Amino acid sequence: MEIMEPYNKLEIRNQKLRTMKNLIIIITLANLLICTSAFTQPQWLTSCAPLGIASAHDYVGALDLTFTHPSTESLRVHTFGGAPTGVHIYRVDRIPNTQTGIIGAGSNDRYFGVFVVGGANPTYTAVYNYGGNPNVSPVNEANLLLFGRFCNNVTPWANLGAALNTTANTLTKTGEVRRGEYILGISGTPLPVELLSFTANWSDGYTSVKLDWQTATEINNDYFVVERSTDAINFIPVVQTPGAGNSNQVLTYTSFDNSPYTDGTSYYRLKQVDFDGSYEYSSIVTLDLGNNIDITTLYPNPVVGNLTYTVSSLTDKDVKINIYNNIGQLVLSRENHLNKGLTKLQVNVSNLSSGKYIIQVLSDTDVVRKSFINREY
């Protein structure tokens, strides 16, 4: 958002901005807020400005421009008529301000816009390459449609009747005029689920992995499958969770992998499946082992007498327990055996003077520490 200083008058002539005092203009991606310097009777106006999160342009020779989204889908404009002098393509990474007229937009949160400069009634061919769009699958690809509108303040979108080529992953529309915005839709089943987050974290002393995800919207969502891999290429299903069908509110899901890999890095992804069998994948999340052991609880703290603590471990192993005073001197040492999972241990510290101490659990590969305060009897 750009907030301009107070001005009395604003004019745009020959692409130059002329201003005078007592007018405040606030510009966002989709709207303009215009009001006086006293902010009396502000008025929101939907902008038709060709604005987006990023753009590309061509002003050289025979115009032919392709602009690619980070997902690798792209829009190309070429074969111009009417002798224009330049062309801009911009992209917007959000659900449009209105979806009126779009069939099956679902959670599609990206679209492109074209702005042509100069010429006499210029025309062009627009080619939307949908390769890389996470909402497109082999199941729904045959039903893809390309919708368009003139600009952001034109409410209804319209089916452009673009030619679909599933071999090239493109939708092509010829005879487009001067400017327009383009978004994917699908006949039949909408593009399904808007996923807000997906995470994987160790749980229960490295004996399981807690899997959490949130959706903002769901359309015809049958179920989710969490998949796991050791190489981020070959995945196997771990757990299946029912979806909500249709929802327009934030929903939270939790599941567990109770037989996780315990040697090296694991990779997880979420597969979302519609009632008609179409599906899409989330981004891959990585889970590292970190330490093979950890002190998960320690109590009471401060302690008088016996200190109880719980240590988690990925495997059965022998460890050394060391306690150091606040100047780093070793004041107590013993050996213990840890079972895979959680092991509850206890040590008597009544012979130690009052003060702050560090308890250390040391194995052949890892070391973990926690502090506690001892109080004498």
Image: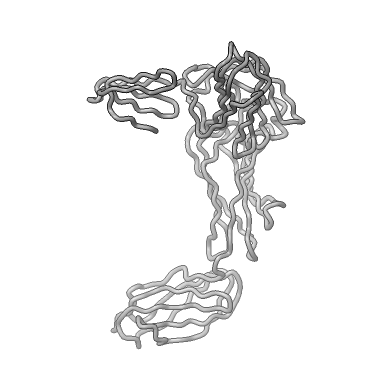
Q: Residue at the location (39% across, 72% down)? A: 299
Q: Residue at the location (55% across, 47% down)? A: 198
- Tag count: 0
Q: How is the image coloured?
A: one colour
Q: Residue at the location (61% across, 72% down)? A: 315
Apparent side of residue 337 relative to residue 33 in the rendered image (left or right): right
Which of these two is toward me, 108 or 302? Answer: 108
Quarter assignment of residue 128: top right
Report whether residue 273 is seen. no
Q: In which quadrant of the rendered image does the C terminus lie?
A: bottom left
Residue farthest along the left direction in this orientation = 38
Report whether residue 309 is seen. yes
Q: Position of residue 124 (x, y in %)?
A: 64, 18
Which of these two is toward me, 316 or 84? Answer: 84
Q: Position of residue 76 (x, y in %)?
A: 65, 27
Q: In which quadrant of the rendered image does the N terminus lie?
A: top left
Quarter assignment of residue 20: top left
Q: Residue at the location (61% across, 49% down)? A: 284
Apparent side of residue 176 relative to residue 35 in the rendered image (left or right): right
Which of these two is toward me, 17 or 92? Answer: 17
Quarter assignment of residue 114: top right
Q: Position of residue 328 (x, y in %)?
A: 39, 83
Q: Position of residue 54 (x, y in %)?
A: 52, 34
Residue farthest along the front direction in this orientation = 61
Residue 333 vs 288, above or below: the answer is: below
Which of these two is toward me, 118 or 258? Answer: 118
Residue farthest along the top direction in this orientation = 120
